Amino acid sequence: MQLIGIDIGGTKICVCFGTQQGEIRISKRIATQPLHGWKEGLKATAALIRELAQSEGINLQQIGGIGISAPGPISSREGKMLSPPNLPGWENAPLVSFFEKEFGRPVIMNHDGKAAALAEYRFGGSKGTLNLVYLTCSTGMGGGAIVEGRLVQGASDTAAEVGHFILDIHGPMCPCGLRGCFEAFCGGAAIAKKIQREIREQSLSTQILQEAGGNLEQIDAKCLINAVQKQDPYALKIWDEFCLRMAQGIGTVLMNFNPAVVILGTIAVHSGALLLDPLRKLLSRFAWKENVQACRIEASQLGDRLSELSALALVCGTDIYRT
Ligand SMILES: [Zn+2]
């Protein structure tokens, strides 16, 4: 049976047709920004679905369901987005009712971090692991938790927002409005901001800046990882601090959920053992040994299929959260 997956992001909307086993039959992306707000965005998405269905000879009446992964905050009960900070014009976008009306098939939507956790549970390298936590480790620190085989949703769709556990009440401000969140220390944007500020204020000479072509504004986590691999002293110092804060954040996750696996996204995928080895050693400072011993820490293996699989995962199986 064919399913439709829709992943709505700040830069692109991804549409795919795929199966319950996570086989993607066809997938296409359109840029979000030129579309003005949700009305235009959803119409363009529906048109793309029809175009793909026609090119593949798929009868839309026989689609099993539509899964939509969207940036938070959302209301899964009302089936809509609320006020996404990176998507102006998409406030209160009624995703579920729009696509139900458009195609007459069941529609399930969820927060992108939760959808990605479900994608790891259904299709990832540790699929089927009943207690699993996923962290995006990208620009921000989104995530989701599977506990005893169920996605944890919460009363206002914000359970397991582990990126916003407070690590230090005197820490840096987080875009969410709290101070000292895990994300404010370990999100890619926060790390880049810290490095840019320190280079500017202390006139530092570092390989990180060279990795960014000498352009301070172009510095990102990838530049840091490259500089660490070249043993740049300042980059190594920043990396040590980063690994320690990662261990503190993940230690909190281990104590809260006692997962059998924590799967890390982008930064861990790019850095591999450079992050995972020190992390494993440091974890014992932040969590009981039972929790540390019970848990594997892995980099995600889903790669660039994550958008499609996150959306498809929402409409696979029957043991998931449904409104
Ligand atoms: Zn926060």
Image (cartoon, rainbow, N blue to C red):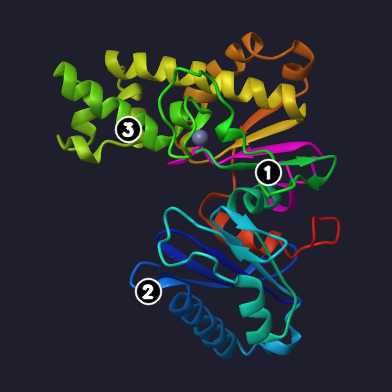
- Residues under numbered marks 3 and 1 in contact, where contact means CB atoms less than 8 Å apart: no
By secondary structure, the bulk of the magenta-drawn segment is best described as loop
Asked if 316 appears above or below 94 in the picture, the reply is above
The residue segment tinted magenta is 121-140
User: What's the residue at 53%, 16% (across, down)?
Assistant: 278
The kind of residue on which mark 3 rests is Ala
Looking at the image, residue 31 sits to the left or right of residue 153; the answer is left
Quadrant in the rendering for residue 287: top right
Q: Is residue 137 magenta?
A: yes
- Which quadrant is home to the N terminus? bottom right
Q: Which of marks 3 and 1 is in front?
A: 3
- Which quadrant is home to the C terminus? bottom right
- Residues under numbered marks 2 and 3 in contact, where contact means CB atoms less than 8 Å apart: no
Provide residue 218's location: percent of width, then percent of height: 23, 40
Provide residue 243's location: percent of width, then percent of height: 49, 19
Q: Observer-nearest residue: 85 or 322?
A: 85
Q: Is mark 2 within 8 Å of ligand 1?
A: no
Q: Mark 1 points at which residue?
A: 125
Q: Which of marks 3 and 1 is nearer the N terminus?
A: 1
Give how far apart the Cα atoms at labels 2 and 1 are: 38 Å
Q: Which of marks 2 and 3 is nearer the N terminus?
A: 2
Residue 226 visible to the viewer: no
- All told, the count of numbered labels is 3
The kind of residue on which mark 2 rests is His
Q: Mark 3 points at which residue?
A: 192
Give how far apart the Cα atoms at labels 3 and 1 are: 29 Å
User: What's the residue at 72%, 85% (across, down)?
Assistant: 104
Looking at the image, residue 17 sits to the left or right of residue 43; the answer is right
Q: Name the residue under label 2.
A: 36
User: What's the residue at 77%, 26% (across, down)?
Assistant: 258
How would you rate the neighbour count of disc 2 (Cα within 10 Å): few for under 14, some for 14-19, many for 20 or more?
Answer: few
Q: Which of marks 2 and 1 is nearer the N terminus?
A: 2
